[in-house]
Amino acid sequence: MKIGVVLGTRPEIIKMAPVIDEIQERGHELLLIHTGQHYDKEMSENFFIDLELPKPNYNIHVGSGSHGKQTGLMMEGIEKVLIEEKPDIVLVQGDTNAVLAGALVAQKLHIPVGHVEAGLRSYDVSMPEEINRKAADDCSYFYFVPTEQSA
């Protein structure tokens, strides 16, 4: 099974490290896609080294920008990768623009989405993260919830 993991920020790298380890330990093919939302060595590269994670197969290098610009560039880059690589599932974690972009693109390509930390809510729709969480959950087939309340 080929499992795609989309991440782009330091918290995603840290939280997905054990998931990435487990994917590899079970002998699945890992497709690691870094959006480059966090691109500074201290916010990204060092965590791959410290957590002994493989180098991403792809880095979209989106960098800084508005929510719309970042998300649009991520979607364009992720779409190219997913069309070429054809993973069996795509995993996203949390509530960042990378999560939104990965979930939307995978669903539109009819690739099942698994959302790690699904169901968490602030109920504050003025927060971009809340919009990302809700949209990612709407796109997801698998919900990996962290609490009974989020279930």
Image (cartoon, rainbow, N blue to C red):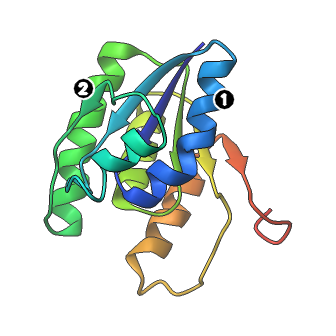
Q: Residue 95's spot in the image, x, y percent?
A: 48, 63
Q: Residue 79's spot in the image, x, y percent?
A: 29, 31
**Which residue is at a point 32% across and 24% down the rendered structure image?**
57
Q: Residue 145's spot in the image, x, y percent?
A: 74, 56
Q: Residue 106's spot in the image, x, y percent?
A: 44, 35
Q: Disc 1 on helix, strand or loop?
A: helix
**Which residue is at a point 22% across and 35% down the rendered structure image?**
77
The amino acid sitting under disc 1 is: Glu
Please tell me whether residue 136 is drawn above or below residue 55 in the rendered image.
below
Can you tell which quarter of the image residue 21 is in? Answer: top right
The residue closer to the viewer here, 116 or 14, is 14
The residue closer to the viewer here, 23 or 46, is 46
Which marked residue is nearer to the observer: mark 2 or mark 1?
1
Q: Is residue 32 left or right of residue 24?
A: left
- Residue highlighted by disc 2: 80
Disc number for residue 103: none
The residue closer to the viewer here, 108 or 90, is 90
Q: Is residue 141 left or right of residue 61?
A: right
Query: Separation of disc 2 and disc 1 at Cα?
Result: 26 Å
Q: Earlier in the sequence, mark 2 or mark 1?
A: 1
The amino acid sitting under disc 2 is: Lys
**Which residue is at a point 28% across and 44% down the rendered structure image?**
35
**Which residue is at a point 27% across and 28% down the rendered structure image?**
58
Residue at the front extreme of this rendering: 50
Q: Residues within 10 Å of mark 1 (few under 14, many from 20)?
A: few
Can you tell which quarter of the image residue 127 is in? Answer: bottom left
Can you tell which quarter of the image residue 66 is in? Answer: bottom left
The residue closer to the viewer here, 131 or 47, is 47
Q: Disc 2 on helix, strand or loop?
A: helix
- Residue highlighted by disc 1: 22
